[in-house]
Amino acid sequence: MSDQVYTVSAEIAGRTLTLESGKLAGLADGAVLARYGDTMLLATVVADKEERTDKDFFPLTVDYEEKMYAVGKIPGNFFKREGKPTTAAILISRLTDRGLRPLFPKGYAQEIQIIITTLAIDMVNDPGPLAIVATSAALSISGIPFKGPLGAVQVGYVNDELVVNPTMTDMEEQSGLNLTVAGSSNAVLMVEAGASELSEETMLDAVQQGHAVCKELVALQEQLVALCGKPKAEFVPPADEAEIEQMVATFMGDQLKAVINQPDKASRDSAIQQLKESVVTHFTADEPPEELPDRTKVLEKAFETLLKEAVRSAILDQGLRVDGRALDEIRSLSMEVGLIPRVHGSGLFTRGQTQVLTITTLGSPSEEQRLDDLGIETSKGYIHHYNFPPFSTGEVKRLGGPRRRDIGHGDLAERSLYAVLPDASVFPYTMRLVSEVLSSNGSSSMASVCGSSLSLMDAGVPIKHPVAGIAMGLVTGSDGRWKVLTDIQGIEDALGDMDFKVAGTEQGITGLQMDIKTTGITYDIMRQAFEEARKARLFILERMHEVLPSPRSELSPHTPRIFSLQIPVEKIGTLIGPGGKTIRSIIEETGASIDVESDGRVFITTADGDSANMAVARIEGLTREAKIGDVFLGTVVRIMPYGAFVNILPGKDGMVHISELAESRVNSVEDIVQIGDEINVMVMDIDDSGKISLSRRAVLTGETPPEPGDGSRSRGNGQRGDDRNKGRNRPRRK
């Protein structure tokens, strides 16, 4: 390890951020220890030493490693060690990757592995932006060719004010915005956000304020580079095969233009592939077998370069897109709801050749997803899963678990809808949405947002407003010209410079994600992209309104019903019983699912109203408190000369004085009741010591109760409070 330790510090948003190098991980190409408050991360970067010429992509891998010791916890699994990455860790890895990737030189293909290790988390400073800063610093001081550094911050919206790097508590409990922005000293590189229907102006202002602080972080990293930066390895970009490109272009003539200007993806892809094969066949006819692979690779690269130039120049020079649309034109739309039988809700959204089917399932509160992010146990009652099978792109691939992309797209859709979900006090159901991508030709994540809104409304979920999403693209020229594209399809995403996804309601933005392939975009570009996205979003929302104007007033007959009641907190133990014996017996007898909250709220979920009524009766019988005026069917348990003791509730007896046994005079208690008799009695009084005075006479005479009972039972609108996503405020973040 180095004998010299290099440290730089700066005040960022009122807290000290420190970057240190030289003490830890000395054999890595670059290693930086980053500390913000008491949150500390170690970022290491290593480049493969072997020259790679066989890859036509950039093999960058980013792994964010959560360590339980960072929060003073021991893993709770059998092996007592960390397992596979959590969703939160995967999302931070993706954020870091997306911010860094545009800053590597074009054509660079050396494999790079980045590992970010959590050493300490103070639960005040979010580790996500710090991971990007630490990694950027490690790359900047290494010899790896990297056109950084870049900074990253979070921006919240607390008390109607934008706040840079709010505390995790403020972000969780108060913020109407969770935005992560990464940028260099002169441009924004990556944006991701969830918001509570904020305006385009507020979002752009948030990006600008965040970028201003990113510049401070860039300056801090430049100080570290000046202290200990290594000379950058010389990278020679692949030689431009101008002569070969000219030969290929001459051979193709106008064929390339003809094959790309087709609206149908399958036909266009097939025609492009056939043309590419004809190029390779023509120019390799006399090639020696041993040189054929290399020659083929050069020709295919030349073809791809010409294809990209043709698509981009048509947009920049003529405003023409491959499918003939105008730059601001949305593909044809088709929507349908209620098309799947027996499910609780379904929505099919088709935009061009992108099609997503979203299914909504409603469950009991106990079916919330339990999370254990770095030992902090939380739960969420709204879950969105995104599936991208190979048939959606007409390919054959191995099926497996969700990939990072699937997790990221599901998180974006989940975050985009979070702001419009009903409060759990109004709608106590756990909601799981699954978006099945059936066909993909661009922006399936935004299609899943639209399909999810339709599915939720079809299920009868009282969302505040429908949400729609659109993907915007960008093509830039070397002369400074640029064009923003609305509703990009796959080829425009692949060959363009930006994928800018915006989701929201008529009132404002709820979700945002921007990835670029250049070294940054200007605010003028972002401003136009926001405006064009707003117009497109409103158009889509109008079409959605035509299909289903508002959430259905009734739940599906296949949806379980939730009944709720309130019991005294001190009765929770009585309801649960020793070792859960009592509540299990009720569940077994009634077939209902029962959830008990710590504040005494009880939720009964069942598909059968009769079983719910049975469960309610059992619970009320166990936990009900006697009130003056209540009438009970009680059992005589003891007789005294002056009256009878009657059991009215489990463990609760009251006394009926001899004068209250009948309407007329009673000479002997035994003349009216015997032990074991069941009689109706009214609560007349409860003294300070809890003794209950009962009357049979009041029931017989129909005496008006002193205080009417006020049962607290209700149906379908349980009072769970504001904890649908306990500890997991969306929009996030992770």
Image (tube, rainbow, N blue to C red):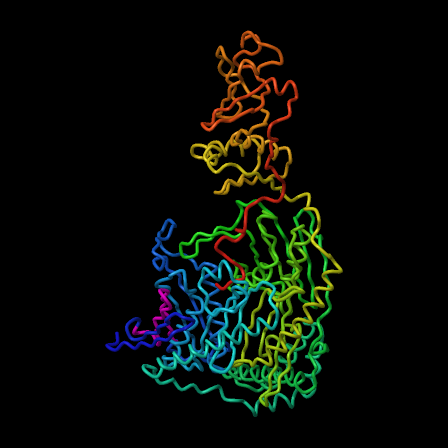
Residue 591's place in the image compared with 322, above or below, is above
Left or right: residue 493 compared with residue 237: right
Residue 293 seen in this snapshot? no
User: Residue at point 54% right, 7% down?
Assistant: 668
| Residue 711 percent coordinates (x, y) | 60, 34
Residue 507, image quadrant: bottom right
Left or right: residue 226 compared with residue 621: left
Residue 392's place in the image compared with 210, above or below, is above
Residue 449 seen in this snapshot? yes
User: Residue at point 74% right, 63% down?
Assistant: 543
Q: Nearer the viewer, residue 74 or 177?
A: 177
Q: Nearer the viewer, residue 617 or 57?
A: 617
| Residue 344 percent coordinates (x, y) | 65, 48
Residue 683, image quadrant: top right
What residue range appears in magenta? 26-47
Please check the rendered image and state whether residue 296 is part of the magenta-colored stretch, yes or no: no
Question: Magenta region, mostly helix, strand or loop?
Answer: strand
Residue extending farthest to the left is 3
Q: Nearer the viewer, residue 272 or 584?
A: 584
Q: Nearer the viewer, residue 236 or 585?
A: 585
Please check the rendered image and state whether residue 43 is part of the magenta-colored stretch, yes or no: yes
| Residue 463 percent coordinates (x, y) | 64, 55
Residue 61's place in the image compared with 73, above or below, is below
User: Residue at point 72% right, 77% down?
Assistant: 325
Q: How many marks?
A: 0
| Residue 46 percent coordinates (x, y) | 37, 74
Q: Which quarter of the rendered picture does the N terminus lie within?
A: bottom left
